[in-house]
Image: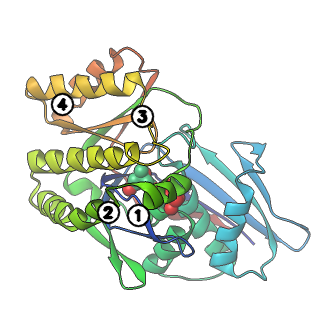
Amino acid sequence: MQATAIAQPNIAFIKDWGKRDVERNLPAVGSISITLSELYTEVSVVLSPELRSDELFVNGEENQPMLPRISRCLDNVIGAQRLRARIASQSNFPIAAGLASSASAFAATTVAAASAADLSYGTEELARLAGQASGSAARSLYGGFAELKNSNDTINLIALCEADSWPLQVVVAITETGPKPTGSTAAMEIFRETSPFYASWIEQQDQDLEIARHAIVQREFAQLATVAEHSCLKMHSVMWASRPPMVYWNSATMRCMQTVRRLQADGCSVFFTIDAGPQLKAVCLPEDAEAVSKALAETPGVQQLMMSGLGPAARLVSKT
Ligand code: DP6
C-alpha cells in the first residue's frame, strides 16, 4: 500500500488571508492563483501494519515538528482508524520560507494518501481535503489558473484557464532561505483577532476577484498586474496592522519591488507579488522574462533566482 504523488506550489494573485472557520480550516475569502511548473514537492506514503506510529522524512531527514499536521491530513483523507504511515517528502526549493511549500506538500500528501488507501476521490473532493490541511493546497489540485470560491460551508474550485493558454513566466527572487518567523495559520488568527482592517479586507475581496477573473479570461495583463499588486500590498498592510505586527519583508524584498517598478517604467510587462515570507515573485510576459531575471539577479540582497512557467495539477506518479 504505497503511492507517490507530485504537486507544484501555487502563487495567489488575489490573496487568501484569514479564516472563517479555524476548526475546518475554511478561508475567510476566495482567492485566485497560478500553479507553477518548475518547483515541486514529491510525497510518497507507505501504509503498513508493521508501523507503530507515523514517521515523516522531509528531504531525507526525520521531521518531528511537522508530523502532527501531516498525520491529521492522513486521518482526514483516510479515516482515523487507518494503518500508520511512513511519509517521505522531497522538494526542489526552500520550505517554510514563503514559497508555498505547504501548498505543494499537502496537495501531494492528499493525493498519495488517498491512492495508497485505494480511495477514489474526485478532484474537487481531493482539493477540499487538501484545503483542510492548508488553505492554499486546495488550489494546487488544479493546474494553470484556478479560483477558490467560498460557498456556504465549504469551498469550490474552478479551473479558470489552462497553463498553456496564457504562458506567463514567474521569476522568484529568493532573499532569505531560513524559515519564516510566524507561520500563516498563527498569523491569520492574530490578524482576525487584532487587525482594525479585518472587515474591510473581507468586504473588498469579491471586487478584486471579479477584476482578476475578467483580466485572466480576457488575457489583460495590465489589468491583472494592477489588481494583483493591490491585493498583495493590501494583504501586507493588514499584516502590518495586526498586533503584534507581521512583517515578512526584508530590505532586499523592498529593493526587488523597486526593481520591478523600474522595469515597469522601462515598458516591461511585469508585476510583483509577495506571500508570507521575504521572497518576491515577479510575474511577466514571456518576452520580458530575460530582462526581468537579469534585473532581479543584479538587485543587491537577492541570493538565488528560480524561473518557472505555469504548471499542471497535483497528480499520482506511482502506486504499488
Ligand atoms: C500568504 O495556505 O499557508 O500564501 O491554511 O494556514 O496553511 P494555512 O494557510 P496557507 O495561507 C496562504 C497565505 C498566502 C496567500 C495565498 O496563498 O493566498
Q: Residue at x 56, y 44 (%)?
A: 182
Which residue matches tag 4? 288
Using the image, determine if residue 259 lies above or below residue 241. Answer: above
The three-letter amino acid code for the residue at tag 1 is Arg
Asked if the residue at tag 2 contacts the one at tag 1, i.e. Cβ–Cβ closer than 8 Å, the answer is yes
Q: Residue 29 has which mark? A: none
For marks 4 and 3, give the one nearer the viewer.
3
Q: Does ligand 1 reach within 8 Å of label 2's beta carbon? A: yes
Using the image, determine if residue 257 lies above or below residue 122. Answer: above
Query: For this view, does 200 lie left or right of residue 123?
Result: left
In terms of sequence position, does the residue under pointer 3 or pointer 1 come before the other?
1
Name the element at disc 1: helix
Which residue matches tag 1? 139
The answer to whether residue 237 is seen in the rendering is yes
Q: Distance between the Cα atoms at labels 1 and 4?
A: 27 Å
The three-letter amino acid code for the residue at tag 3 is Gln
Which residue matches tag 3? 279
Q: Distance between the Cα atoms at labels 2 and 3?
A: 20 Å
Quadrant, the C terminus: bottom right
For marks 1 and 4, give the one nearer the viewer.
1
Q: Quadrant for residue 23, please give it.
A: bottom right
Q: Between residues 127 and 257, which one lies in front from this camera angle?
A: 257
For marks 3 and 1, give the one nearer the viewer.
3
Q: Does ligand 1 reach within 8 Å of label 4's beta carbon? A: no
Which residue matches tag 2? 31
The three-letter amino acid code for the residue at tag 2 is Ser
Q: Residue at x 18, y 31 (%)?
A: 288
Q: Where residue 109 sits in the image (x, y, percent)?
A: 61, 63
For marks 4 and 2, give the one nearer the viewer.
2
